[in-house]
Amino acid sequence: MSLGSDWREFRARLAVMSAYQRFEQLVTFTLSILLVVIILAAMWNLFLRVLLGLVVKGSLDPTDHAVFQSVFGAIFTVMIALEFKRSIVVSVENRDTVFHVRTVILVALLALLRKFIILDLEKTDAATIAALGFVTVSLGLIYWLIRAQEMGRG
């Protein structure tokens, strides 16, 4: 599709929307733009960290645990932002007015995975690790139940 036909289709959809639906579309579009800015900033930060640390200074040792945590934490930050962006785009394309709970849980699981990667086990108490594990298992179970329910309907 061309940009012109996309614009015409968008305007046609906008004409039949209620005022609140238009407001939701505006908020969704604004969130989408903000997430693009965040993704670009996170990518730039990651690029500089890796380029300056690895190539210029030669101090970025991927076998160093702290460096591994830092770099992969930054990578997961970008991935989480991309998943948020994708969920917004899918919502707009499907003309949904709400985000799917399954997508929100998936993003939460990604955030927990990032937390586990950057977690310093020497400074974190056992209760915190147990709580994070419990939340991860709970979200995984909820994700599985929602997915099973959606597959049963489809």
Image (cartoon, grey):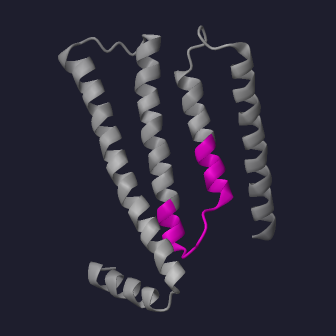
Q: Is residue 100 left or right of residue 16?
A: right
Can you name the residue that lies furthest to the top here?
Answer: 122
Res 99 quadrant in image: bottom right
Image coordinates for residue 133, horizontal then vertical, percent:
73, 28
The answer to whether residue 129 is magenta is no
**Is 37 rendered above or below residue 100?**
above
Please name the residue shown 28% across and 78% down the image.
3
Residue found at x 61% / y 34%: 112
- Determine whether, in the image, residue 131 is placed left or right of residue 3: right
Could you tell me residue 129's position as x and y percent?
A: 69, 21
Quadrant where the image shows the C terminus: bottom right
**Marker count (numbered):** 0
Q: In the rendered image of this protein, does residue 66 appear above or below residue 81?
A: above
Residue drawn at the location 42% of the way across and 72% of the way down: 26
Q: Which residues are magenta?
A: 88-108
Choose between 86 and 115: the one closer to the eye: 115
Q: Quadrant of residue 153 in the image?
A: bottom right
Q: Is residue 59 above or below residue 139?
A: above
Quarter of the figure with the N terminus: bottom left
Q: Is residue 100 magenta?
A: yes
99 relative to 131 in the view: left or right: left
Q: Nearer the viewer, residue 152 or 140?
A: 140
- The prevailing secondary structure element of the residues shown in magenta is helix
For image coordinates 22% across by 22% down, the residue present is 52
